[in-house]
Image: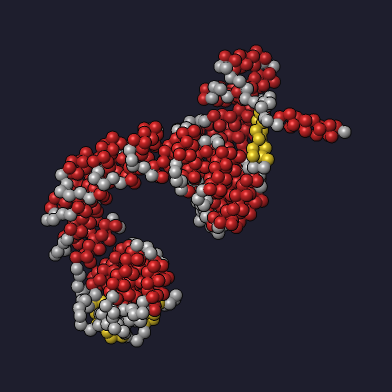
Amino acid sequence: MFYHKHSHKCQLLKTLTLTKRTLCIKTPTFFTQNQTSTPTPRNLKLLNTQITTFMRNGQIQEAQNLFDKMSQRNTVTWNSMVRGYFQNGQFKKAISFFDQTPQRDIFSYNTMISGLMQCGNVDGAREVFNKMIVRDIVTGNSMISGYVRNGLIDEAMMVFDEMPEKDVISWNLVIEGFVSCRKLDLAEKYFEEMNIRDIASWTIMISGFSSAGRIVEARKLFDNMPMRDVQAWNVMLSGLIENGCLDLAEDFFARMKEYSSDSWKILINGFVDARRINDAMRYFWKMPQKCQKTWNSILLVLTRAGLVKEAHTHIEKRPYFDIVSWTNMIVGYFESNNILAAAKIFESMSTRDATAWNVMICGLGENDHGEEGLKFFVRMKESGPSADESTVTSVLTICSNLSSLKFGEQTHSQVVKSGLNNFTAVSNAMITMYARCGNRNYALSEFSFMHTHDVISWNSIICGFAHHGDGEKALEMFERMILTDAEPNHITFVGVLSACSHAGLLTKGYYYFNYMKAKCFIQPTSEHYTCMADLLGKFGLIDEAMRFLGEMRIHGLEIPASVWGALLGACRIHKNIEVGEIAGEEILKMEPQNSGIYLIMAEMYLNKGRRKDAEKIFARMKLNKVKKQPGCSWIEVNNNGHVFLSGDTSHPKFRVICDTMDLIFTEMET
């Protein structure tokens, strides 16, 4: 085996055949670097250049068409196609073209090694490398680069040590490998051993020191550089910002000898990340070539800080906006609960992509306007872009919250037709939708059809069974879960403990609560304590429930109204008015307008014959202007929800409904 420099001398090469399983050597072919089987036409070089240009611009079909039309091709032609397909991620096609290449030069093999490493096929690249008779420095560098890319620094060093000749790129690749795997001392050692360094050598070390928080050493290296380019300045600037030295970075920026667009972006993004919006805007307006992405990042920070109107004003005053800008405004208005403003922006947009529609649908759902969100989904199907996985996930979530089974089923059929059911997130949303709408069999069927299950899949099915009181089935699914690679999280145990509570499984409730802490190392949250308080309360173990509340305080957790509510419900059932008073008063401290708590406490007093105390409760309600919330129910007819409140006669078909109910009652009586 020997390495060989590029020259015009005859080179010994072999040809390889790549199959799906192995790489086999064909009979070696002797030819010079530019030799082809047929004479090269004058314009062949231009055609090869055109293929390279097409591939570089992602115009794969155009490159293929040109290749097919060429009456004569040389090795460069085939190499351009192989490299182009690798560049565009079509690895099988690249391998196929390499297989078909009539004659290969050393560039053919180097391209193959680089491409295989790029797609993670380390073994294939190694096989090509090991079977090469002639290698050059580029061959070794391609192997080192590929090993480093795939996190195999030891293998990279073996190739480096075996190379008879190394150039500055070889050294830089090794140093960069050590930096990437956080072996900075070794990187520094090899840097010191270099006879010749280029700007990239220094820049790699500066970046490494900066990433390790050794900013003083990074700056010292920068100051010692014999020559610097704009990339070196940018790396040092970025290092100062990453290490929290924003003011120093600003001074450094002012002293830079030359700037690129990245220089401005780095500084502006540094101010954005530090929430120094005024400074970010000041430099943005100084920026010679405005960057829309940078401007959008500034606007996004403003919206997340609750300054949506200010961000909106900037968009209207300045000519810098695109779909992303307006979409961010919609998100900001939804987050500040200004639904009308969000809808107004959406309707004013001249063009809308799938993301804009998704934000609108999801935002309406999260702001309790799910029915409107479903109407937007219908509009999107009629006149908007095609729905994607985010769209249907949001729609299915809305159907879950509205218990809109019919609309959910229709969406399910559309999901299957479009192939979106292959996305795990979509399948998870369907499980949740069917479970919350009461169709547990369909939920389980969808779960069973999934190819892979993540923790959300398991949580959806466990919580679905728990929600409908099928505790045994929920626990069965949990036991299946812990046999897989999926790790339970705190939501999993909310479902498990809720299942125990609904099914009255006291012993198992204790077991899983302790299992969560001891085996899964999950600290209980208020939701877990709520489940346990509810479970203990069902068995009348009020004192034990109070002990759990004391445990919450020990762990620094505030006892939320939900926990006190579970305890109050238990006290009501088991007529423990002493603890019930404590629980009720604690809830009213947090929710003074909660009419249900007043009524429960008054009922408990009346059942104990303490009429005066009950009257005091009613007096407090009147003083605090608390009104009893009317009963509410709703049904779905033809994908439209109909809400009915106790005592409300505003429904447009109220008279017809009443007449129909009278007929039903008459039929029942007869």
Rendered residue at 20%/70% (across/down): 166
Q: Residue 149 at what x, y percent from top left?
A: 32, 62
Image-quadrant location for residue 106: bottom left
Nearer the observer, 523 or 342? 342
Rendered residue at 55%/32% (across/down): 563
**Is residue 125 depicted above or below 197 in this figure?**
below
Colour mode?
secondary structure
Rendered residue at 40%/75% (across/down): 68
Q: In this orientation, does residue 58 appear?
A: yes
542 lies left or right of 83? right
**Is residue 57 depicted above or below 644 in this figure?**
below
The quadrant in which the C terminus is found is top right
Q: Residue 610 at what x, y percent from top left?
A: 67, 16
Q: Residue 437 at what x, y percent from top left?
A: 64, 44
Nearer the observer, 410 or 45? 45
Rendered residue at 16%/54% (across/down): 228
**Is residue 42 depicted above or below 509 in this figure?**
below
Q: Residue 190 at what x, y percent from top left?
A: 20, 62
602 lies left or right of 240? right
The quadrant in which the N terminus is found is bottom left
Q: In this orientation, does residue 239 appear?
A: no
Nearer the observer, 487 or 218? 218
